[in-house]
Image (cartoon, grey):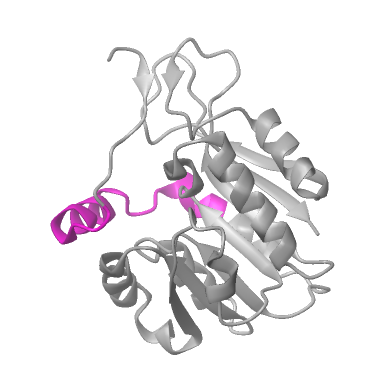
Amino acid sequence: MTNFVGAQHEFHDAAFVQGWADRFVPTAPRLALFDLILEHIGKPGLPNAHVLELGLGPGYMARHILERNAGIGYEGLDFSEVFFEVATKTIGASMPRVTLTKADLMDQNWPEKISRQPAAIISTWALHDLGSQQAVADVYARCYETLPMGGVLINGDFIKPNGTTWTYEPGRFEIDRHLELLRQAGFVEPMLLASYELNTETPTAAQNYACLMAVR
């Protein structure tokens, strides 16, 4: 298909996962996204110091955050045992502070599997792979139900930029729609924190992502 932005993944296949992780070692813009997330989950006033990452993947964000904030506990949720193996190597010496939780975000009962209530739920480049706006909306709703008052949800994910003539896979959609779904989930005044690598003319599947935050 021409003028289409999307990707197919085999995240239960060890060779595919390792190759994917090797290709997506964080670039400068992606590290900037990690730093922005770190800034907001490190602010005083959160109900507790437990962070839940949805879609742990190869563990790049977990390592970045844990190496820079010694005061938080970390829980990485993923549906792939293979990703747990890669992430364990990536995170290295910080693994004693990490809880690994296997769960599928398409299962509406995934919050029942986490170890404790988090004060922050974070995610990067994961929710679009759920394949639809409804699936993302369901995750937003479960996050709202899971967080305590004052807790934060921060999602850095691929989006469909305004003004593009390209067709995007269903899980990549406009920022305004994300904000609408967050409000429908119950969050008040969700906001766009930043956009990265915007390209409407000749986009690749690794470009056009944004960081959104919502407070419970």
Residue furthest toward the left?
A: 15
Whether 179 is drawn above or below 127: the answer is above
Residue in view at x 32 percent, y 54 percent? 25
What secondary structure prevails in the magenta region?
A: helix
Residue 67 drawn at (x, y percent): 49, 76
- Residue 177: image quadrant is top right
Residue in view at x 36 percent, y 27 percent? 204
Residue 213 drawn at (x, y percent): 71, 50
Q: Position of 88 compared to 131: left or right? A: left
- Residue 86: image quadrant is bottom left
Whether 131 is drawn above or below 149: the answer is above
Q: In which quarter of the image is the C terminus?
A: bottom right
Q: What stretch is highlighted in magenta?
A: 11-33
Residue in view at x 39 percent, y 17 percent? 202
Q: Quadrant of the N terminus?
A: top left
Q: How many labels does the image show?
A: 0
213 or 177: nearer the viewer: 177
Whether 185 is drawn above or below 177: the answer is below
